[in-house]
Image (cartoon, rainbow, N blue to C red):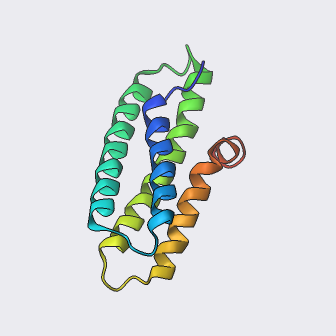
Amino acid sequence: MGDPLPELHAIELTFLSMISELYEDYPDISDEFVFKFSLKTAEYSKELNNSLKIYAKIDYFKNQTAKVEMKTLIKFAYDLLSLLLSLIKNFESNSSSKEKIESQIEILYDFIDRKQKLISTTYH
């Protein structure tokens, strides 16, 4: 069937790229980076909502495989969105330590990087 959520996947790859760029400039996290990261997170959230609309239209009895596959990807996307929002809160918080932010960035990178394995083992 191919990737049923290509828009979400493309944004996830953008996050990997953004994180790689951040490591080049780390520990200086610019306001511009936080702004771009926040916009990309909003875009991801919007695409996730669009994916839910598509998912709702799939008839389980006519296309069980597609329904199950999309459900696992949507579960992954929700957890990823939670990580993204948590990271944004820490970017914007004056009390968050650089170590905490760095730890969350590493978790986020690893989470996206291991997507296929997580989907096949944890989410499916």
* Image spot of residue 28 (x, y percent): 39, 73
* Image spot of residue 39 (x, y percent): 28, 51
Point out the residue furthest to the front here: 24
Left or right: 20 in relation to 37: right
The image quadrant where one finds the N terminus is top right
How many numbered marks appear? Answer: 0
Give me the residue at 65% from left, 49% from top: 114
* Image spot of residue 44 (x, y percent): 37, 44
Q: Nearer the viewer, residue 99 or 119?
A: 99
The image quadrant where one finds the C terminus is top right
Give me the residue at 51% from left, 50% from top: 16
Left or right: 5 in relation to 69: left
* Image spot of residue 58 (x, y percent): 46, 21
Q: Nearer the viewer, residue 87 or 119?
A: 87
* Residue 85 quadrant: bottom left
Position of 41 relative to 13 (above/below): below
* Residue 52 quadrant: top left
Give me the residue at 49% from left, 49% from top: 17
Give me the residue at 45% from left, 45% from top: 14
